[in-house]
Amino acid sequence: MRFTMFSTLFGTLLAAGGASADINKPTTAPPVPISVLDLIDTTTIISLLAVVAILASSYAISLRALDPATPSRFRVLFIWHAFDFLIHTIFEGSFLYNCFFTSAPFDPAVHHPALLTNFLGTSNKLFGAAYGDNWATKLWMVYAQADKRWAGADLTVVSLELLTVLGAGPLAAWICYGIAKKDWRVSFWMVVLATGELYGGFMTFAPEWLTGNQNLDGSNFMFLWVYLVFFNMLWVFLPLYAMWVSFDDMKNAFMVRNKVVNAALQRQKKEK
């Protein structure tokens, strides 16, 4: 007990002495926070404008492909799925291209050994946007400032993107065709695609949440709210909206069917 009290008192005196000594030290200014303007370069501007152009193209396609009497909710979903298809095909397709065809030799003097994952059965090369110089590598290196995994060939991300580009993208294009043609199967496949989009989003970020977000940088507005939150939450709220519309559409179909069946049963009873 006495030893504890003495050690506590001694520690307090040391802390006080250290504090008084710090008074005589020259103070350093706190780091200047990074401005959003500091993070916007030509590649960033072109990338954001490309997203806007893809959205505008999706809207323009809807004007040509849809009947003027198309309900607004299906018009919104047509635009969303056209946008979804183009983003998956152009942007994420370019990510996969760099993962499979853009590489650099592994240099132990420069690269960390953890970067070697035996991707494509290769133990002496590194793959991904960080090791190339084309329009897509520049685009993905901008996004990689917020999520480092997109600079290389992260195995989880590549696996999900293979399903996204080769599966979700074509399915989104077919859904657009189905909405335009008033195909009765559209609602079912919208649910399938929306489920896949939500699952893919969870599997993209769950490994980061479980490991303390080691690859994510949310230190400023641009990285956190534009790259990580806004662009990823689009693939949460719009798929949920697609599910809601599809549920309502299928509910109405079943209600009509039930009315027809009940009416047929009533006729049979009267005939008897």
Image (cartoon, rainbow, N blue to C red):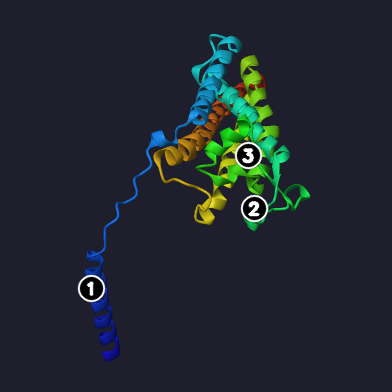
**Front residue of this view, candidates 247 and 102:** 102
Residue in the image at 23% along x and 65% along y: 24
- Secondary element type, mark 2: helix
Give how far apart the Cα atoms at labels 1 and 2 are. 46 Å
Identify the image quadrant of residue 177: top right
Task: Tell which of 235 and 182 is nearer to you.
Answer: 235
Residue 95 coordinates in the image, percent (x, y) = 64, 36
| Residue sticking out furthest to the right | 121
Q: CA distance from mark 3 to mark 1?
A: 52 Å
What label sits on residue 154 in the rendered view? none
Label placed on residue 115? 2
Secondary structure beneath label 1: helix
> Is residue 221 placed above or below 25 in the rendered structure?
above
Which residue, given by chain and number where applicable, does mark 3 sit on?
129
Q: Nearer the viewer, residue 110 or 185?
A: 110
Where is residue 249? Give x, y as percent: 56, 25
Do we see residue 38 in this rendering?
Answer: yes
Q: Are marks 3 and 1 in contact (CB under 8 Å)?
A: no
- At x 22%, y 69%, the residue is 20
Q: Where residue 52 appears, x then y in whole percent?
A: 50, 22
Q: CA distance from mark 3 to mark 2?
A: 13 Å
Judge left or right: residue 211 versus residue 105.
Answer: left
The residue singled out by tag 1 in the image is 16
Residue type for callout 3:
Ala
Earlier-in-chain disc, 3 versus 2: 2
Indicate the position of residue 175 as horizontal and vertical percent values. 64, 24
